[in-house]
Structure formats: structure tokens, C-alpha cells
Image: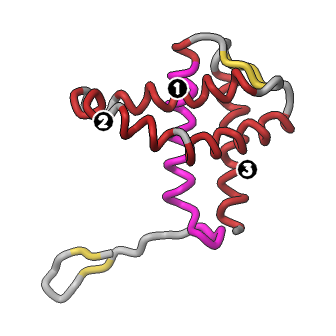
Amino acid sequence: MAGIIIRWIISALGVLLISYLFDGIEVKGVGWAFITALFLGIFNALIRPVLLILTLPINVLTLGLFTLVINGLMLWLTGSLLAGFNVHGFWPAIGGALILSLISMAASSLIGGKGRVEAIEMRRSRGGDWEA
């Protein structure tokens, strides 16, 4: 449970960061950033998998780059439904989705399910190969 809360906080900070970086993305305060991160997480859990399956052929043709468009659509959808979060235009949505994806990927790789920072320890086996 602690891992989910920490990821939620990191996502809210990411929303604040993209509103600072992109002129076309506006957040009306820290509280709205947390609400935005919550709704974005819900949309990514419920709607995004359906869109990924429906757009699988184009995703294969673009070698997965169309996933960035879908992430941008999720950000735009969140902005269109919440009064305190606005996304003005396609390119700010794509740029914001890219930054949020990088932040989420880094947070997920560093934070375990129990909310602790995890480190990968590499050591040599008897054969001389590295193993995790």
C-alpha cells in the first residue's frame, strides 16, 4: 500500500513538473495535481489497455511509438474532465505524456511494492558471469 501512495505522490509531482515545463498544460494548485494523478492512474488502468488492444496493428507498425499518442490521449482526457487541470493542444499532451511516462518508469523501477527503495545487487557467479 505504501508503494502505491509513494507512486501517487511522485505522479502528482510529475504533473506539477509538466505544467511548469509546457505552456499548454495548466494545474490550478497542488491539490489538483494529486486529483489529476489519481484520475490519470484510474484511466491508465481501465481505458488504456483497451485502447492498446484496439490499436495493436498501428502500434506494431510504428514499433510501439503510437503508445505515446495513447498516453497523450489519456492526459488530454484527464484534462478535459477535470476543472483544475487543462491540456491545450496535441503537442503539449504528447510532451507531457512523455515526461510523465519517464517519471513513472523511474519510480516503478526504484520503488517496490512495500514502498521501499530497491537496489539491484550484481555479483559474479563461479563461472565469471554477472547475475542479479
Q: Residue at x 52, y 26 (%)?
A: 72
Q: Which amino acid does label 1 sit on?
A: Gly
- Name the front one of labels 2 and 3: 2
Q: Are marks 1 and 3 in contact (CB under 8 Å)?
A: no
Q: Where is residue 85 in the image (x, y as percent from the top left)?
A: 76, 25
Q: Where is residue 16 in the image (x, y as percent from the top left)?
A: 73, 32
Tag shown at residue 90: none
Q: Residue at x 64, y 73 (%)?
A: 114
Q: Which image quadrant: the N terminus?
A: bottom right
Tag shown at residue 56: 2
Query: Image quarter for residue 113?
Result: bottom right
Q: What residue type is labelled 3?
A: Ile
In the rendered view, would you say 57 is above or below 91?
Answer: below
Q: How crowded is mark 1: few (under 14 residues within 10 Å), some or many (20 or more)?
A: many
Q: What element carries label 3?
A: helix
Q: Give the range drawn in magenta.
A: 93-117
In the rendered view, would you say 48 is above or below 28?
Answer: below
Q: Is mark 2 on a helix, strand or loop?
A: helix
Residue under numbered circle 1: 72
Query: Image quarter for residue 19?
Result: top right
Q: Is mark 1 on a helix, strand or loop?
A: helix
Q: Where is residue 37 in the image (x, y as percent from the top left)?
A: 70, 41
Query: Image quarter for residue 43?
Result: top right
Q: Please tell me which of labels 2 and 3 falls first in the chain.
A: 3
Q: Which amino acid does label 2 sit on?
A: Leu
Residue under numbered circle 3: 9
126 lies left or right of 35: left
CA distance separating discs 1 and 2: 16 Å
